[in-house]
Image (cartoon, helix red, strand yellow):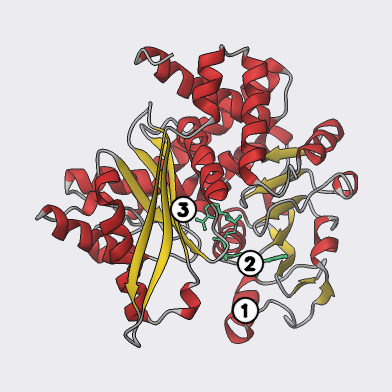
Amino acid sequence: MLKSNPFTVAQKQINDCADVLMLKHAERAMLLRPMRELHVSIPLRMDDGSIRVFQGFRIHYNDARGPCKGGIRFHPDETIDTVRALAAWMTWKCSLLDLPLGGGKGGVVCNPKELSQAELERLSRGYVRAIGDFIGPDKDVPAPDVYTTPQIMAWMMDEYSKMVGKNQFGLITGKPLHLGGSAGRGDATARGGMFTLREAAKKLGLALKNATVAIQGFGNAGSFAARLIESMFGSTIVACSDSKGGVCNHAGISVERICERKNETSSVIGVQGCSDISNEEIIEMDADILVLAALENVVTDKNADKIKAKIVMELANGPTTPEADAILYKRGVHVIPDFLCNAGGVTVSYFEMVQNSYMYYWDINEVHQQLDRRMTHAYHKVLETSKNYRINMRQAAYVLAVQGVVEAMKLRGWV
Ligand code: NAD
């Protein structure tokens, strides 16, 4: 029951953190529920002339620290509770990175793979018309998420600009570069994770040049992580996997080869010179660093005691269960928790908002430097809090993030 509803999990995490911080009743109550929710029905004329009605949501979880920020998912299994949980996690992520933003999220229950391009465009525009009063550059700034793309962001920005009668590039982030997107947004999530990995390795005295790496998940986050670990640190990838299975070679696998194989066959399986490995085995693989970049709940109380890695990087959201967290902490495995490790994406989205409002665009080096500064600072704050409170890195990240939101609510006189 607890694991099947992501919002129940999110609320448990908030309650646990509220206990550590001894929050007052009103503070806790404000954190446990979204501040605002909008439910909409979107009529869509299909290519065959019929009309279908789609359900959509947009949530402002908490905007005490600034306009809400969070992606839009187009997914057939989208539920209001998933959107609530994701909006809560966005609130903590923005606060932890000290971005002047609150947390939000949105979604439409649909399967984009079953829609034509023209239907997808009309649905994207219809969604923006339906939620138009609820969003805006100073109010709530959406972004891409599962099954939504820079092209969809461009349509949404265009529709909103028509509604208000002027260009509004600042409405949405993750836009294409020709329409006010930011340099460096593509690999921002993985690159942000690299900066936290570099700091973690320093803390543990691990030489990244000699380190071995296993990567579960070879999509956007995982494939960029593989390329960057190799190019930035010279570490050796010894295993990687995707939904179909994985490959391993203790002597090392060239990332270029893996990418070629993935492009040719849409799977990493069969890379020359490698043996097969399952997605379960990759987690227990003999490697210094384990990168989790696929799904939630893959490290559990069943396998946490078998993990050999010294550092676990959570690029995925929610890959480790609370029971496994406790085991890893006790065993001294250093976990870089999800809403710290994968915060590079929203951080560069924030840079995109800043560039849109200044009408002045940074070069890639500027983006990388600013991202490095923020991720490194956040990592060390979490590490220090974890030592001070004698809690694990995830609990420490929660304490800092929730404190930031509560402080803002107090200063505004809400609680
Ligand atoms: P993606 O769809 O591009 O890639 C997911 C990868 O996981 C694919 O390679 C897929 O084959 C693989 N996969 C699916 N099921 C698997 C299984 N059972 N075992 C092993 N691999 C499996 O998605 P993504 O954008 O890379 O996101 C991956 C994770 O990172 C998600 O949890 C997402 O929420 C998180 N994340 C991504 C971003 C981002 O900017 N892309 C930002 C923050 C968090």
Q: Amino acid at mark 1?
A: Lys
Determine the residue located farthest toward the left in the rendered image.
Answer: 165
For the residue labelled by badge 2, is the local secondary structure a helix, a strand or a loop?
Answer: loop
For the residue labelled by badge 1, is the local secondary structure a helix, a strand or a loop?
Answer: helix
Disc 2 target residue? 218
Q: Nearer the viewer, residue 232 or 303?
A: 303
The label shown at residue 262 is 1
Establish if 200 lies above or below 188. Answer: above
Answer whether residue 339 is visible to the viewer in this image: yes
* Badge 2 residue CB within 8 Å of ligand 1: yes
Image quarter (top left, top right, bottom left or bottom right) of the C terminus: top left
The label shown at residue 188 is 3
Callout 2 crowding tier (Cα within 10 Å): few <14, some 14–19, many ≥20: many
Q: Earlier in the sequence, mark 3 or mark 2?
A: 3
User: In the rendered structure, are the residues bearing label 2 and label 1 in contact, judged by CB atoms less than 8 Å apart?
Assistant: yes
Answer whether residue 362 is visible to the viewer in this image: no
Establish if 42 lies above or below 50. Answer: above
Q: Is residue 375 left or right of residue 368?
A: right
* Badge 1 residue CB within 8 Å of ligand 1: no
Q: Is residue 35 left or right of residue 341?
A: left
> Residue 165 at what x, y percent from top left?
9, 55
Callout 1 crowding tier (Cα within 10 Å): few <14, some 14–19, many ≥20: some
| Residue displayed at 52% across by 20% down | 403
Establish if 171 lies above or below 206. Answer: below
Q: Quadrant of residue 385?
A: top right
* Badge 3 residue CB within 8 Å of ligand 1: yes
